[in-house]
Amino acid sequence: MGDLLSLLTEYRHRQVVVNFYEEDELVARDGFFFDGIERSNGLLSFIKDGRIRWSIRLDDYPSYEIVHDFPRHYRFYGQHRAVELYFPS
C-alpha cells in the first residue's frame, strides 16, 4: 500500500474534501485547497502557503485503500474510525 501514499503525494494545487467517520457514522466534514502533500515522520500532511494545513497521523489509521466506487477517493481507517479523502476534478 505504500504505492497509495506515493500516489497521494503527486496531487498538487487541488481541493480535497475530508470526511471523518466514527463507527461508520459521518461525524464531520471539511474541505480546503492545498499546494501539495508530503509524507514524513509518520504523517501525511497537506501543505498550503508553505505551512501544514492538515495532517493524518498514519499510526492512527494503519490501513488504507482506494475506494473504487468513486474516482480519486481514498479511505484511511483504524479501529472504529476512518478518514476519507476525495479530490474533486
Image (cartoon, helix red, strand yellow):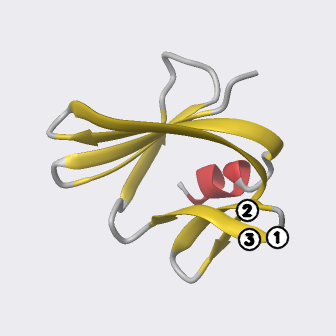
Please tell me which residue is depicted at 62% across the width and 56% down the height of the picture.
5
37 with respect to 84 (left or right): right
Q: Are marks 3 and 1 in contact (CB under 8 Å)?
A: yes
Graded by Cα atoms within 10 Å as few (under 14), some (14 to 19) or many (20 or more), the crowding at tag 1 reads few
Q: Nearer the viewer, residue 34 or 85?
A: 34
Q: How many marks?
A: 3
Q: Secondary structure at mark 3?
A: strand
Cα–Cα gap, marks 2 and 1: 6 Å
* 23 up-or-down from 26: above or below: below
Residue beneath disc 2:
47
Q: Secondary structure at mark 1?
A: loop
Rendered image quadrant of residue 43: bottom right
Residue 53 percent location from the top left of the image: 64, 61
Residue 3 percent location from the top left of the image: 64, 54
Q: Are marks 3 and 2 in contact (CB under 8 Å)?
A: yes
Tell me the quadrant of the picture where the C terminus can be found. Answer: top right
Q: Secondary structure at mark 2?
A: strand
- In the image, which disc is placed on residue 4? none
Rendered image quadrant of residue 60: bottom left
Residue 57 percent location from the top left of the image: 44, 69
Please tell me which residue is depicted at 58% across the width and 60% down the height of the picture.
2
The amino acid on which the numbered mark 3 sits, given as a three-letter code, is: Arg
Cα–Cα gap, marks 3 and 2: 5 Å
Residue beneath disc 1:
50
Q: Nearer the viewer, residue 64 or 50?
A: 50
Please tell me which residue is depicted at 68% across the width and 24% down the height of the picture.
88
Q: Are marks 2 and 1 in contact (CB under 8 Å)?
A: yes
Residue beneath disc 3:
51
Graded by Cα atoms within 10 Å as few (under 14), some (14 to 19) or many (20 or more), the crowding at tag 3 reads few
23 with respect to 89 (left or right): left
* 68 up-or-down from 20: above or below: above
Graded by Cα atoms within 10 Å as few (under 14), some (14 to 19) or many (20 or more), the crowding at tag 2 reads some
